[in-house]
Image: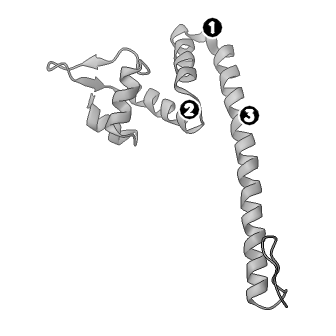
Amino acid sequence: MYTMKETSQRVKMTYEALKFYCNEGLVPNVKRDKNNHRIFDDRDVSWIEGLTCLRKCGMSISDMKVYMEHCMIGEESIPDRKAMLDIQRKILIDKIRELNESVEYIDSKQKFYDDVLEGRIKYFSNLISVVD
């Protein structure tokens, strides 16, 4: 069993974030020690790691709750969970495409600046007039 502090360190989450997830009901069946402090087992830790991944993927807290509710139903809800993950995957693929386009833009600007600095091309600007 792990304390809140130990669990937050294991899942690389702040103590406050873990407490928020617990208070939001995202960690079901939270156990308590003799002093009424939350304690977590390995299954809880695995679940929280999954929540962390879903959050990094951009899933909202409310969608995470729906996902958890489906998980609590059991095997029969697998198609619903797969559908939710498919939607999140498509969102991530779009973000990756946007990020790749941004990296390409930055790379092209860096090449332009290098070419200007090394005298391969003449400087021009879309914002100001450049006098020869």
In the rendered image, residue 106, in percent from the top left (x then y), is placed at 72, 65
Whole-percent x and y of residue 17?
Answer: 38, 34
Q: Which mark is residue 76?
A: 1
Residue found farthest to the left: 35
| Sequence-wise first label, 3 or 2 | 2
Please report contact status of discs 3 and 2: CB closer than 8 Å, yes or no.
no
Compute the Cα span from label 3 to label 2.
Answer: 13 Å
Q: Which residue is mark 3?
A: 90
Q: Which mark is residue 118?
A: none
Write down the residue under mark 2.
54
**Is 23 situated left or right of 2 in this image?**
right
Q: Earlier in the sequence, mark 1 or mark 3?
A: 1
Q: Is residue 16 left or right of residue 109?
A: left
* Amino acid type indicated by mark 1: Glu
Q: CA distance from mark 1 to mark 3?
A: 23 Å
State the image coordinates of residue 75 (x, y, percent, origin top left): 59, 11
- Tag 1 near tag 2, CB within 8 Å: no
Residue sitting at 70 percent across and 44 percent down?
A: 95
* Depicted 112 relative to depicted 32: above or below: below
Amino acid residing under circle 2: Leu
In terms of secondary structure, where does tag 2 sit? helix
Disc 3 is placed on an element classified as helix
Location of residue 64 by image quarter: top right
Q: Is residue 125 left or right of residue 58?
A: right
Q: Residue at x 74, y 79 (%)?
A: 113
**What residue do we see at 80% from left, 91% from top?**
119
Answer yes or no: is residue 42 visible: no
